[in-house]
Each structure stands twice: as C-alpha cells, then as structure tokens.
Amino acid sequence: MTDLTELTIAEARDGLTSKKFSAVELTDAYLAAIEAARGLNAYIVETPDKAREMAARSDAQIAGGEARPLEGIPLGVKDLFCTEGIHSQAGSRVLEGFKPRYESTVTSNLWADGAVMLGKLNMDEFAMGSSNETSAYGPVINPWRSSSNNADLVPGGSSGGSAAAVAARICAGATATDTGGSIRQPAALTGTVGIKPTYGRCSRWGIAAFASSLDQAGPIARDVRDAAIMLKSMASVDAKDTTSVDIEVPDYEAAIGKSVKGMRIGIPKEYRIDGMPAEIEEMWQRGADWLKDAGAELVDISLPHTKYALPAYYIVAPAEASSNLARYDGVRYGLRVEGDDITDMYEKTRAAGFGAEVRRRVLIGTYVLSAGYYDAYYLRAQKVRTLIKRDFETVFADGIDTILTPATPSAAFGIASMATASPIEMYLQDVFTVTVNMAGLPGIAVPSGLNAEGLPLGLQLIGRPFDEATLFQAGKVIEDAAGSFEPKPWWS
C-alpha cells in the first residue's frame, strides 16, 4: 500500500470511506513523519494525544455511516489561530504560556467537519515576515534544496511552517493566513498550492490580528483540489466577525476540471518589474501559453496604480498593527516582566516580548498615525488603496475573468542571506501579492515548475470578489500542464 502520508486529502478521504485504512492509522503515519522531520522546525507544538482521540472519533463516525467532509483528515494549524486549551502564541514570546479558552471560528469549522489536529505550526512573529525567520521559535527550513548546494533555504512567510509541513508530507493540509502574501508567497517557494480567499469569506474571529482590514485565513495544500476541499470547510459567515460576509459558500471542488475555453485572462503590464529574473518572466509566459492552449483568451491589461501598492501597504499594515498589538501589555495573559510601576512593566514586557521586526513595524505604524503625519501618510495611503481597488474593478468590468501574474520575484533564498540587507529588500518579496490584499480580492498560488537549480516557482491567479471557484478552475489547468513535483526527503 502507498505510504499513507503520500495521499492527497481527496485520496485519503476516498481511502477512509472505503475502509482501506483507518483514521487512527492515517494519523499515526503522520505523527511518525512529524517525529522524523523535526529538523525542519515546522511544528512549534505537536498534539499526538488529541490527534489520536479525534481520529478515533472519526473512525466511529465512518463506521456509523456518518462521515463528514473532512472526516479523519490530519491537518496542521498555523500558530496564529487560537485553539482551545492548546498553545497559541502567534510565534511570539509576548504570548508565552497562553492557552485560550476558546476556539477560532475557522478551526471550529474544520473540527466540525471531522478534521484531525496534528499540532501548531511555526510562523513569522505575528505574521510579520516573508521568510519565517522572525519567529521566537527559530526559522523553519524549506524541505526543498538547490541542486547546486545543500544550504538551508527559507520556506517563505509568514505561513512558512504551514507551507513546509505540507511540502514535507507531515500534514495533509494546513491552515494559514495572508495579510500581504503570507499564504501565496510561501506556497510558491515550497511547491504547494495556497489560496487567499476574498476578504470576508473566512471569519477572522479567534485569529491573532496583524492588520484587521487586510488579514484573511485560507488553506495551503498539496494540489488545487485539496485547497478547494479545505476552503469549503474553512469559509463561513460568523456573527462574531462583522467583516465576514453572508454569501453562500459554493462547492469549490465542483469547479475542478471545468473547461476554461472562452475565459478571458488578463496579463497586467505593470507586473513586468525592472530587474525581473528571466526564469520568472519565462515561467509567466509558459503559464499564459498553457491557459491559451486550453482555450482561454489572453488580454493585455493595465493596473496603473500597482507601483504604489507596496509603499501604501507598508503604511496601512504597520498602522493597524500598532493599534492591534497595543493589547499585549503583560497584565492579563502572556509574558510579564515586572517593573517599578505599570508604565515600566509595559515597556519591559514589550521590549522582551516583541522581536525586532515586530518592534520596527509597530514604530512605523505609530509614527504614521501620529499628529502631523496622519494626513501625510496614513490618509494618503488609504486613498491610494481606493485607486488600486478601482483599477481591478475597471478591468473586471471590461470582461476579464481572472488575472495571471508571477507569485514571487524569485525562488527560495538562503536562511540568513538577507540578514545584512535593508528591510526593504525583504519587503520586496511581496511585490506581486500585496495588491490583492489592498483590494480585498481572492488570489491563488499554483506550482508552475522548477528553476535551473531545481527549486519550485509559482504563478498567481487573481479573481473577482467571491469568485474563488474560477481560480480553482484556471489553477487546475496550470497544475495539470506543469506536472507534479516534490522535494526529496533529505530530512528523515
């Protein structure tokens, strides 16, 4: 029998339904794989006892003929999601020892559909990073390695633990979040599929906030079908989150395999940035050709305010972060460093609890919201955001069904390779992804091949609001044309 951890969610679902193996057997296979892959540092906390307990309940459901959509499927959970009674620290020291008394809505939805929790996955601290090097628990190592050397590579961020765990076959799928590209960028760097749904499609309740108007939960999975299966369970309207939208969640899996004949695919000229590596340009052209060969029509489009997206994002996101992170003060929960008085305690707790990147963004955010600078920076950035959103609305109104772009400006890079670089160089990793968050649109990253050094590259599809189904439909065409590939397991 095939190693159980090699099965996709769809394949494992079918095997469990036909009783070829049990949910406990499937879970045990993943727990053994996790133990063998601890060197990747993908998991912060493993929950084997809870996983086996949940798997046993799934076996009972299956035996009773009452299997739910994700019955017995073992998943990893990004540490940003609160899980009742289980470590939930957002990759930060400031939440040291925090075990919430409640469950996030997204994870509640997954458990209600029968999924099994394997543990909490590593991430950039408070989702602030593009390489998973800002975590208080150390960097995650990408399961992929260059054919030219054995240097450890980053998996991307902030959902680096989620992407690495899926790529390394130490979970069947994983929850993730995306504020400026934190699902799509790590998916592209690890050869996995990641979708950021439309803002409001998934509840944000119970997810530690970074930038409330940008954050959105979504899945990272092995293929397009698995991502569709997971998103169907994750998405819902939620009375506890007024930004969640009461729109029916379709059967995304039904979109898989549908023809793209007649679909109009936009190719934005503004994404051809200066200094773009030839391998990224060539991959983009290949992706366009695959869609054209499948019957889609390619249309050159313009999104004129794209060049302002990254600077506007790095004003809006830190501003919202400075407000959201003010709640971590050492008074009620998490790390507490005693001081001479309450102000001293606040200062010492935050100095000890927040890492350098979080402190940098909080300072930037506080600055742009301060008196005399609010109009010059924050208000202007919000106006730019409106223009970016209008660019997309104009293009979609002209009959474009989806937009094709690269997902990242490069393949995975070495751990610590940007340690001496300006923070701006790291921020440029999000150059192709932040526009989607600024406009609140859905975007999916799909593996599209390997570069000359054998490292994965990904393409991005951007869709109309709440039209994730079209992204799955077109993404499947790219996936089929690119073929499948996975890292060699050097870590076990």
Image (cartoon, grey):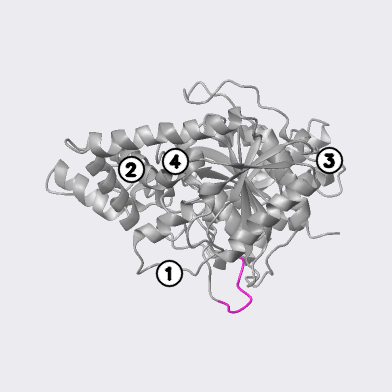
- Residue type beneath disc 2: Ile
Of marks 2 and 1, which one's residue comes earlier in the chain? 2
The label on residue 315 is 2
Q: Give the distance between the C-alpha atoms of the residues marked 1 and 4, in whole angstroms.
A: 32 Å
Total marks in image: 4
Task: Count residues near mark 2 (Cα–Cα under 10 Å), then give few for <14, some for 14-19, many for 20+.
Answer: many
Task: Count residues near mark 3 (Cα–Cα under 10 Å), then give few for <14, some for 14-19, many for 20+.
Answer: some
- Residue type beneath disc 3: Thr
- Residue type beneath disc 4: His
Q: Identify residue for label 1.
A: 416
Q: Secondary structure at mark 3?
A: helix
Task: Judge whether residue 57 is colored magenta.
Answer: no
- Residue 85 seen in this snapshot: no
Q: Which residue is rendered at x = 60% and y = 31% of the image?
A: 396
Q: Identify residue for label 4.
A: 305
The label on residue 112 is none
CB atoms at circles 2 and 3 under 8 Å apart?
no
Q: Secondary structure at mark 4?
A: loop
Place of residue 328 in the rendered image (x, y in percent of width and height, measured from the top left) = 30, 41
Q: Give the distance between the C-alpha atoms of the residues marked 4 and 2, in whole angstroms.
A: 16 Å
Q: Identify residue for label 3.
A: 17
Place of residue 167 in the rendered image (x, y in percent of width and height, measured from the top left) = 65, 58
Q: Secondary structure at mark 2?
A: helix
Q: Is residue 296 left or right of residue 442?
A: right
Of marks 4 and 2, which one's residue comes earlier in the chain? 4
Task: Count residues near mark 1 (Cα–Cα under 10 Å), then give few for <14, some for 14-19, many for 20+.
Answer: some
Of marks 1 and 4, which one's residue comes earlier in the chain? 4
Between marks 2 and 1 in the image, the one whose residue lies nearer the viewer: 2
Q: Give the distance between the C-alpha atoms of the residues marked 2 and 3, in whole angstroms.
A: 49 Å
- Residue 258 seen in this snapshot: yes
* Span shown in magenta: 143-150
Q: Which residue is rendered at x = 57% and y = 33% of the image?
A: 395
